[in-house]
Image (spheres, grey):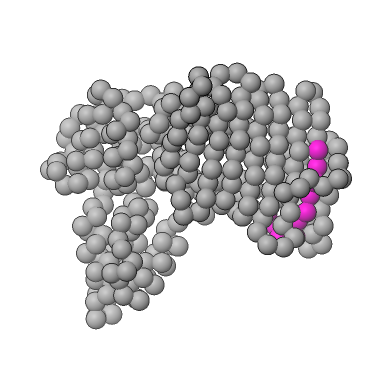
Amino acid sequence: MRWSATRIACGVWLATSLAIVPTYSLAASNLLERHAWLKLRIEQGRIRTTAPPGQCLSVCDERLGQTERLAVDYKSGPLQLRYERKTSEGRIIFQVNGSTCCQIQWESSVGIGPLYFEQVPGQPVRVRLYENGSEKHYQATGIWHLLSIYPDVRQELVRCLEQLRPDWQLAYKLQQLEEQLQKRWPEVRIEDVRQCVARLGDSRYAVRNAADRQLRQMGLEILPLLDQIDDQTLGCEQRFRIARIRNSLLPLTEDTPDQVASWLLVDEGYWQARSLASHGSEREWVRAHLNLLRGDSASPSFPRVARHVQP
């Protein structure tokens, strides 16, 4: 996106929307937070950026050794955003092309070399990290998977993302998530979900409705399990009901540790990746959990290992 020639200094905004007047807060820590109509959230492990349609903005703020630039164009087509911030900590560039498609470039002034973050709908979240002259690649279903599975990238990725939204408190939420994973066990099995989905195609209306209610009562844990079922094997009504169940269960707010734990507890891919990345007693616990998901363990009576996530 091109920067507008207009440079508007220190807290003054320009918007072309006639229907919605954007709100502005001088108390916020950066330009992204100061424009309260611009929302950045982590939902289902992915960054989601939203703004009222019709907005067009170009602003620059230079003060106290910090330089920020923000440009937003949502007059037609998908949301376009570019944000750049340079401080004593480093330089970040955040670009958005549509609400869930984004790229981040983070160059820290201390510590590890540059980090590149890419999020494209329908693809894994990807991170490239340069350290001591070598390039490391990471990818996972979402941000929580990356932070939980790969300690090598955790600290720098947290620093990077909190340049955009300091109030995300990712290290604290990650510790809470780990505590949830330590004390909870899967309450739903893939076999139970498959049986209910099969009954959604029953010829009897009462049976279909009962299966629908049972799936809803299982809660958030069924969402990753539904992903394991091939839509091509389902009938029209089965696909229709599953879509409605997904929509009813998906949270409409930012991710919480409790919600994320519900998804990860039954996500076999997560536990498989974590077993490969973990070591020692942690690996034993992770593999035991993985065996439980695969039906290889009769009960969750094996020991757990305390794991404190370092920010």
The image position of residue 189, as x and y in percent, is 23, 52
| Residue 52 is one of the magenta-drawn residues | yes
* Residue 108 occupies quadrant: top right
Magenta stretch holds residue 139? no
Q: Residue furthest front?
A: 133
Instruction: Give how far across and how far down residue 167 sits, in percent.
Output: 60, 35
Choose between 95 and 213: the one closer to the eye. 95
Q: Can residue 311 be seen at all in this image of the molecule?
A: no
Q: Residue at x 28, y 34 (%)?
A: 275
**Residue 209 quadrant:** bottom left
- Relative placement, left or right, of 261 versus 76 is left
From the viewer's perspective, tell me whether residue 307 is left or right of residue 83. Answer: left
**Label total for image:** 0
Residue 46 in picture, x, y percent from top left = 51, 46
Which span of residues is magenta-colored? 51-60
Residue at 34%, 25% (x, y): give it: 307
Identify which residue is drawn at 35% across, 76% down. 236
Left or right: 158 as drawn, with respect to 6: left
Residue at 28% in and 80% down: 205
Judging depth in this view, the residue of 289 and 134 nearest the camera is 134
